[in-house]
Image (tube, rainbow, N blue to C red):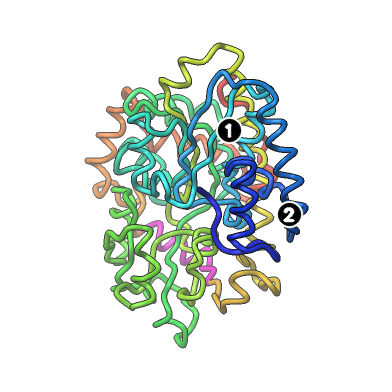
Amino acid sequence: MGITGRIGNLSRRDLFRVAGKYGMSSTLMAAGGFGGAMSLANLATAAESTYEKRFSKPAKHTFKFGAAGFNQRNLLIERAGALEFARDLEARTDGEIRIEFIGDNQICGQTSCVEKCQQGIVDFYAASTQNSAGGAPYLNVLDYAYMFRNRADQYHFLYSPASAALLREPYEKRHGLKLLFSHAELRGIQLGLAWENKPTVTSVEDLAGTKNRVTGTQLGRIAMKALNLNPVPVAWEETLDGLKQGLIDGAETWASAVAYANMSPVVSQSVHLNFFCGTEATSMNAGVFDSLSGDLQDAVLESSYWAQTHVQAANEAALVKTVGQSDPQLPGTIFAQNNVRNAFLSDAEIKKAEEMCSPEFQPQLWEDWRERLNGWSGGRDTYQEIYDEVRTISADTLPENVEPRRWWKG
């Protein structure tokens, strides 16, 4: 339940010894609070303290959080905020809400967590909205090509009251799920080892004809086909093997996903096409939320807001300092250690890709899905309204400088 590999000097067996005494969730929350290496004694002390706080009184509600393949180690690489949210919500409610955090694909995976949450098997879940789009098709609304220019646009939209009508309310109404917060990156093509000795990609044409893994998003496939990237559906859990064996040239995903999933050893180039969303989101079963008292509903929203601000700052730092998505790369980052080259395309190349595939320039490619999503939203022009909203901020806004707002307060 959420512990794999080593942390500092601790083995998996050491971690399970502590978890056997204080419970897995308390151990995970304690481990997630350490920024670096820890000793067995330190972890045991922290886990005991966490346990005592969490169980100082009986909980009114105990909820399961299905966190796909995440655990305390890889959540320090891709800062999706799941453990921080759980810790904050328990503290904010003085233990009235207790969360059982179940990661490492033990209760659900990237494509199945959404359905498990809809069915009530888990009460919260974390997975990418693109993988979740198979079970909740309205999430495709985030995936129009080049609707978001950069990560700042994504955070601005997540904080914006406009996200209620354009994303959150239709998602809840159609699929029974409440989107709480999300990390924000943009997707590119992560090329396998066959590209190790090839020149760094500088143009869309360099990628033409390659065969690339695609997620559950229908809209992402439209863009990939228009860019001649031959989308092939491959489960996230099978993508590493596909790259390793050369069954696919690359995978459409984002940089920190490569890093957290231990995919860096089989990726040679991270091509930053930035063509649509990579959003690792945490959602809640809407019926469970509605069953809570007003003060606990407020607590869920406030913890979601706090987690969103945490993710905004922490993931921006981790991209540079942990993952290695920068030019030049910092030594010791995951990309630097595994010889993963960043391929940052020029503004002119990004514009060329946009003109090849976006609804702005190729509206006919998007008509069917756009009409469908507009209908599900109650008649909003989903693409145009999100496009316009995110352009209310300057294109050169840094992601960490986007103003946080409580989106539910209008």
- The residue tagged 2 is 35
Badge 2 marks a residue whose secondary structure is loop
Q: Earlier in the sequence, mark 2 or mark 1?
A: 2
Question: Does the magenta portion include 35?
Answer: no
Q: Residues within 10 Å of mark 1 (few under 14, many from 20)?
A: many
Question: From what the image shows, is residue 264 above or below residue 134?
Answer: below
Spot the residue most to the top: 294
The residue positioned 49% from the left and 47% from the top of the image is 103
**Magenta stretch, overall SS:** helix
Q: Nearer the viewer, residue 53 or 272?
A: 53
In percent of width and height, residue 294 lies at 57, 11
Spot the residue most to the left: 368
Name the side, left or right, on which 399 lies relative to 269.
right
Splitting the image into 4 quarters, where does residue 245 fall? bottom left
Q: Residues within 10 Å of mark 2 (few under 14, many from 20)?
A: few
Question: Does the magenta portion include 351?
Answer: yes
Name the side, left or right, on which 87 lies relative to 182.
right
Pointer 2 with pointer 1, Cβ within 8 A: no
Question: From what the image shows, is residue 219 above or below residue 122?
Answer: below
Q: Amino acid at mark 2?
A: Gly
Name the side, left or right, on which 344 lies relative to 369.
right
- The residue tagged 1 is 159
Q: Nearer the viewer, residue 244 or 11?
A: 11
Question: From what the image shows, is residue 16 above or below residue 208?
Answer: above
The magenta-colored residue range is 343-355
What is the CA distance from the residue labelled 2 to the residue labelled 1?
27 Å
Residue 397 seen in the current view: no
Q: Where is the C terminus found, in terms of image quarters? A: top right
Q: Amino acid at mark 1?
A: Tyr
Q: Which mark is residue 51?
A: none
In percent of width and height, residue 369 lies at 26, 40
Badge 1 marks a residue whose secondary structure is helix
